[in-house]
Image (cartoon, rainbow, N blue to C red):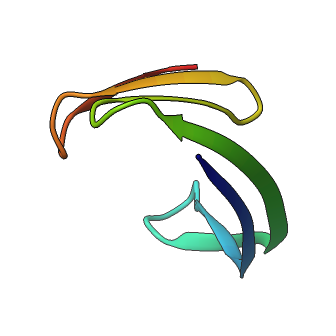
Amino acid sequence: MTWTTEYIKRELDGIQYVPNNNSDDWEKQLDLIKKQSGLYSSLIYKIDQDWRVGLRYSAMLEYNFSEFNRIRLQ
């Protein structure tokens, strides 16, 4: 049984440019400042080497065909 919690934060500070209708240049449209964050927690139970079930914000069932290939239903 594994319990995982993750906090994600992103800050964006830049300028959005749009094409200028009168030439091939770009013109500044507006300052772009965004702040986003989120938190999630999950509880995963590993049945055997290939199967896992768990809860995040919904139920989850996962089958691992190999270490590079898996299918997950939520």
Q: How far across and down, in percent of the image, does residue 4 sit? A: 66, 57
- On the rendered structure, is 23 left or right of 2? left
- On the rendered structure, is 64 left or right of 39? left
Give the farthest residue toward the bottom: 13
Determine the image quadrant of residue 68.
top left
Q: Residue at x 63, y 68 (%)?
A: 17
Q: How far across and down, in percent of the image, does residue 52 sit? A: 45, 31
Q: Nearer the viewer, residue 23 or 14?
A: 14
Determine the image quadrant of residue 63.
top left
Q: Residue at x 70, y 77 (%)?
A: 15
- On the rendered structure, is 65 left or right of 10? left
Residue 7 higher or lower than 68, as above or below: below
Q: Residue at x 20, y 35 (%)?
A: 69
Q: Nearer the viewer, residue 25 or 35?
A: 35
Q: How far across and down, in percent of the image, does residue 2 sit? A: 60, 52
Residue 13 higher or lower than 6, as above or below: below
- Number of labelled discs? 0
Q: How far across and down, in percent of the image, does residue 42 sit? A: 69, 45
Position of the C terminus, as image quadrant, is top right
Q: Nearer the viewer, residue 37 or 6?
A: 6
Q: Nearer the viewer, residue 21 or 7?
A: 7
Determine the image quadrant of residue 6.
bottom right
